[in-house]
Image (spheres, rainbow, N blue to C red):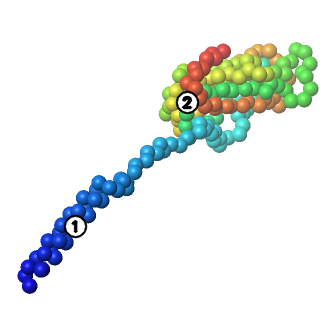
Amino acid sequence: MGKPLLAVIAGCCLAGSFAARASAEDFPRLAESLRYEVSGRVSPHCQLNQTEHSINFGDILDTLTGGSLSATAQVGVRIDCNAPFAISFHSDQGGMRLDGEAAPSPFRAFIPYVVSVDLEQAALSGRASCRSERMTDARSCVLGASDAGSEAQARISLAVAADERPLMSGHFSDQLWMRVTPLLGGETVAHSSE
């Protein structure tokens, strides 16, 4: 009775070793590997957030000369840009013009101003300023560029120079446009300093 049992056990073990050898040699590999490149794109985007929608010099009449006093005004704006960017300005009229009819001689109906920008907590490649007369038609004044993205507060400053030439009374106005443009190809920006 002991011999047949031993033969059965030995037979099972031999059959198992042949089966294991056959699966390793006769069947193809069951595991394959694939490689995927995983990527995405983030588009350049700039956003301006303003809390004030006007810049008011107030009354700039010099009562001694009838001309204009020197005056400054500032406004803040938040810049959020995820790429290097340039800041530019454009003036609809090249300065503040008297609303309504033209002023009779010798009165002036036009007040030019100078605009400049400071960017806090981020580096601009220089501070510059532009005269409003240089920002009309198709021309814009580029005041600065950042070589990196930024979330920062910008301070826009406008200045009117003292001028003794008499001004016509009334409301003077202009539309000033600020633009922040992403620099996509690492281009350089020529800064205006007029």
Q: Position of residue 122 (x, y in %)?
A: 50, 31
Packing grade of label 1 (10 A; few <14, some 14-19, many >=20) is few
> Is the residue under label 2 in contact with that under label 1 (CB below 8 Å)?
no
Side (left or right) of 37 relative to 77: left
Name the mark on residue 16: 1
Q: Quick check: can you spot residue 127?
A: no
Q: Quadrant of residue 130?
A: top right
What amino acid is labelled 2 in the image?
Answer: Pro
What amino acid is labelled 1 in the image?
Answer: Gly
Q: Nearer the viewer, residue 125 or 29?
A: 29
Side (left or right) of 18 relative to 101: left
Give me the residue at 90% from left, 29% from top: 100
Sooner in the amino-acid sequence: mark 1 or mark 2? 1
Q: Position of residue 71 (x, y in %)?
A: 68, 25
Q: Position of residue 58 (x, y in %)?
A: 73, 32
Above or below for 73 versus 133: below
Above or below for 118 versus 80: above
Q: Position of residue 33 (x, y in %)?
A: 40, 49
Q: Nearer the viewer, mark 1 or mark 2?
A: 1
The quadrant of the picture occupied by the C terminus is top right
Q: Nearer the viewer, residue 66 or 155?
A: 155
Name the mark on residue 84: 2
Side (left or right) of 113 relative to 100: left
Q: Quadrant of residue 22?
A: bottom left
Mark 1 secondary-structure assignment:
helix
Packing grade of label 2 (10 A; few <14, some 14-19, many >=20) is many
Give me the residue at 92% from left, 19% from top: 104
Give me the residue at 72% from left, 37% from top: 54
Mark 2 secondary-structure assignment:
loop
